[in-house]
Image: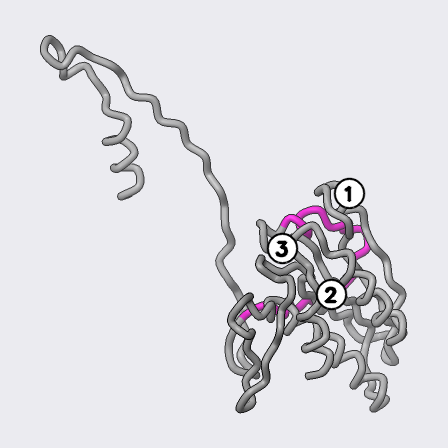
Amino acid sequence: LQEFLELVRIPCPTKDERAIGDLLKQRLTQLGGIVHEDQAGVALGGNCGNLVADFSGTLPEAPTIMLTAHMDCVDPCRNIQPVLKDGIIRADGTTILGADDKAGVVAILETLRQLKEKSIQHGPLQVVFTIAEENGVHGSQNLDSTLLHADYGYTLDTHGHPGVMSFKAPGKNQIYIRLQGKAAHAGVEPEKGINAIQVAGKLIAE
């Protein structure tokens, strides 16, 4: 809880994740990870790259599991003041809360902490904290995939009650279509004209 309240107060709009990135690098290192930062931030014109941390684990023969969440947050995410009341955390009403995806980040950090503090046996782990998710998952698209070697991965970035998992989810493809009609004299040969708006309407309907 305290870590969540701390992290949501750190401004981290898309392409300006440096402050949260530096803190997470420190936390991951303290928890025993070997942290790498890629060059996605440079490619996207931001000030921080994706973070990939490797944890050797105590069962090297077990599959390598990846846990991932994103660091950036939608605006307005500056001067966030979280309020805890009746077991529910909300913003004070002047900004968003920023739980997307600090909730996922904190869950991963707490998982690592529990594994270490309670000496729980586990296989190798990879933790991936990405940038620039909110504007179109561009951080993931520019992730240095040579850093990844996990067998399975779990993204902690969805809603639902504890214990609920999304196995598959729809993706998003952006399609840009330019429709150009055909001009015709309305009084002489209207049948030779093609109305671009009408064609677009039919396309959308289908």
Label 1 sits on what residue type?
Val
Quarter of the rendering containing residue 183: top left
Quarter of the rendering containing residue 108: bottom right
Q: Which mark is residue 151?
A: 2
Query: Residue 55: horizontal and vertical position, in percent?
Result: 85, 71
Q: Which residue is mark 1?
A: 42
Label 3 sits on what residue type?
Glu
Spatial CA span between label 2 and label 1? 28 Å
For image coordinates 59% across by 67% down, the residue present is 100
- Quadrant where the C terminus is found in the figure: top left
> 61 or 189: which is nearer to us?
189
> 41 or 199: which is nearer to us?
41
Q: Which one is earlier in the sequence, the residue at label 3 or at label 1? A: 1
Query: Residue 3: horizontal and vertical position, in percent?
Result: 73, 79
**SS category of the residue bearing label 1:** helix
Q: Which mark is residue 133?
A: 3
Badges 3 and 1: C-beta atoms under 8 Å apart? no
